[in-house]
Image (cartoon, coloured by chain):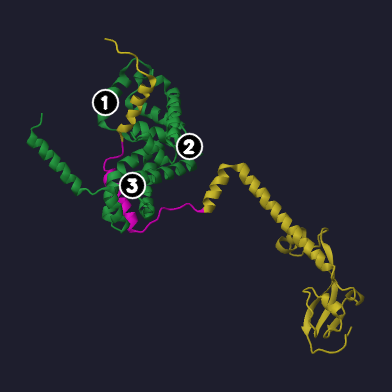
């Protein structure tokens, strides 16, 4: 007698039953509890993947997201540099006009509160009486262009066309006994 | 028909076995106190079903073995969080399933390497499976191992959540309600996923289901 055709879903369930016959290598279930107990006795935790490792894998999976993050990082760096540059520019505006009156190469002694304009001209902005300051050539303000040009790769850097003069600068302070006058030599 | 004395002996031995094997909850309580021997009994009791589920999900023996081991270790370390709202088995399954789903997400973009286990000797004597390989269909030239590979390849084409439902229900035989608790969803979602997963499998295995 011919049996009625079977429902495809029933046939699928029959086929899926094949999965129940898949067995691991012999002895696996005898060894697994021992392995687990050894790990527990050793106090091992389940290794969690580090956040940076997950992030790296995620970036590798999604290159466009990675590129976006890289662009964002670059934009942040450029923004940071521009902020620093602006800060330098602001600092230069405080340079004393008085200092410019002294010839290059001369030395100036600052006494206590005699000439605060001169003290403001010090590169560190300090007001330290009793120091001798030497007036030198205008220096170059560091910019990204001359960072690379000067500090890292070039032994004798030439000023970058992008570098801006910082203005007249005083340098090499030497501590001397305080006096009551300003000496210009 | 067994004699009454034989039946009574069987009942007595079953009761003795039950007394010898404590239930999951008491074993969990002992394990919480650091009794590794109690946890060892829990591992031996549930390892086959946990392993089988993870193996069917990954299609790879080594991955399944590692995930099973990690799941039990994680369960032991998290025993203090087990409040007994659900059975230990359900709770353990939830840990194993979540860990496996995370693993599969990470593996999604890698080429999946099938490392299938051997078929049990009894498979060759299962009348349903004998019929599947002997009927006059395109699969008539296939042996059971080849059929196994086709079936696993089709299963791996399903999404992880659909595959999980098929494995838990159609292979492991868990009820919808238990699957819903394990997968943290409602039974309607389980039924819906099962329906669509079977539809997809029927399409993928159409040649072998005629």
Marks 1 and 3, the one that precedes in the sequence:
3
Label 2: chain letter: B
Left or right: A29 as drawn, with respect to B165: left
Q: Position of residue A80 (x, y in %)?
A: 72, 58
Position of the N terminus of chain A, as image quadrant, is: top left
Instruction: Give the residue pinned by disc 1.
Output: B126
Q: Where A128 falls versus A83 (above or below)?
A: below
Q: How many numbered marks appear?
A: 3
Chain of the residue displaying label 1: B
Q: Dividing the image into 4 quarters, which one contains the C terminus of chain A?
A: bottom right
- Look at chain A in the picture and name its colour: yellow
Q: CA distance from mark 1 to mark 3?
A: 33 Å
At label 1, counting other C-alpha atoms closer than 10 Å, the crowd grade (few under 14, some 14-19, many 20 or more) is some
Report the residue marked by disc 2: B111
Tag 2's secondary structure?
Answer: loop
B193 in the magenta segment? no
* Image quadrant assignment for residue A5: top left
**Subunit under mark 3:** B
In percent of width and height, residue A111 lies at 83, 85
Q: Position of residue B60 (x, y in %)?
A: 39, 38
Q: Which residue: 27% across, 45% down?
A: B45
What tint does the image give chain B? green
Q: Secondary structure at mark 1?
A: loop
1 or 2: tag closer to the N-terminus? 2
Residue matched to label 3? B88
User: Between tags 1 and 3, which lies in front?
Assistant: 3
């Amino acid at each position: 007698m011919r049996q009625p055709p079977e429902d495809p879903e029933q046939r699928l369930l029959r086929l899926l039953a094949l999965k129940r016959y898949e067995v691991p290598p012999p002895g696996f279930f005898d060894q697994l509890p021992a392995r687990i107990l050894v790990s527990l006795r050793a106090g091992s935790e389940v290794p969690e993947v580090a956040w940076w490792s997950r992030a790296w894998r995620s970036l590798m999976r999604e290159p466009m997201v990675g590129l976006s993050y890289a662009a964002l990082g670059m934009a942040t760096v450029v923004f940071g540099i521009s902020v620093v540059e602006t800060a330098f520019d602001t600092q230069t505006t405080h340079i004393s006009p008085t200092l410019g009156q002294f010839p290059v190469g001369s030395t100036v002694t600052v006494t206590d509160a005699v000439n605060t304009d001169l003290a403001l001209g010090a590169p560190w902005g300090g007001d330290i009486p009793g120091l001798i300051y030497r007036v030198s050539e205008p220096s170059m303000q560091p910019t990204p262009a001359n960072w690379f040009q000067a500090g890292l790769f070039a032994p004798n850097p030439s000023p970058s066309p992008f570098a801006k003069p910082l203005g007249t600068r005083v340098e090499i302070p030497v501590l001397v006994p305080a006096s009551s006058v300003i000496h210009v030599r | 028909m067994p004699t009454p004395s034989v039946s009574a002996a069987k009942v007595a031995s079953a009761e003795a076995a039950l007394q010898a094997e404590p239930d999951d909850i008491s074993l969990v309580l002992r394990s919480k106190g650091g009794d590794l021997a109690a946890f060892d009994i829990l591992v031996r009791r549930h390892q086959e079903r946990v392993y089988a589920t993870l193996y069917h999900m990954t299609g790879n023996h080594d991955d399944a073995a590692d995930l099973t081991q990690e799941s039990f270790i994680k369960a032991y370390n998290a025993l203090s969080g087990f409040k007994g709202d659900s059975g230990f088995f359900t709770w353990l399954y939830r840990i194993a399933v979540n860990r496996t789903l995370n693993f599969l997400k990470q593996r999604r973009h890698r080429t999946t390497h099938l490392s299938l286990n051997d078929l049990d000797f009894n498979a060759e004597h299962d009348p349903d499976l004998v019929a599947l390989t002997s009927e006059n269909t395109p699969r008539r030239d296939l042996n059971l191992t080849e059929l196994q590979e086709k079936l696993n390849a089709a299963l791996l084409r399903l999404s992880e959540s659909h595959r999980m439902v098929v494995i838990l229900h159609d292979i492991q035989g868990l009820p919808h309600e238990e699957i819903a608790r394990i997968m943290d969803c409602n039974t309607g979602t389980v039924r819906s996923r099962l329906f669509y997963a079977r539809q997809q499998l029927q399409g993928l295995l159409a040649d072998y289901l005629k």
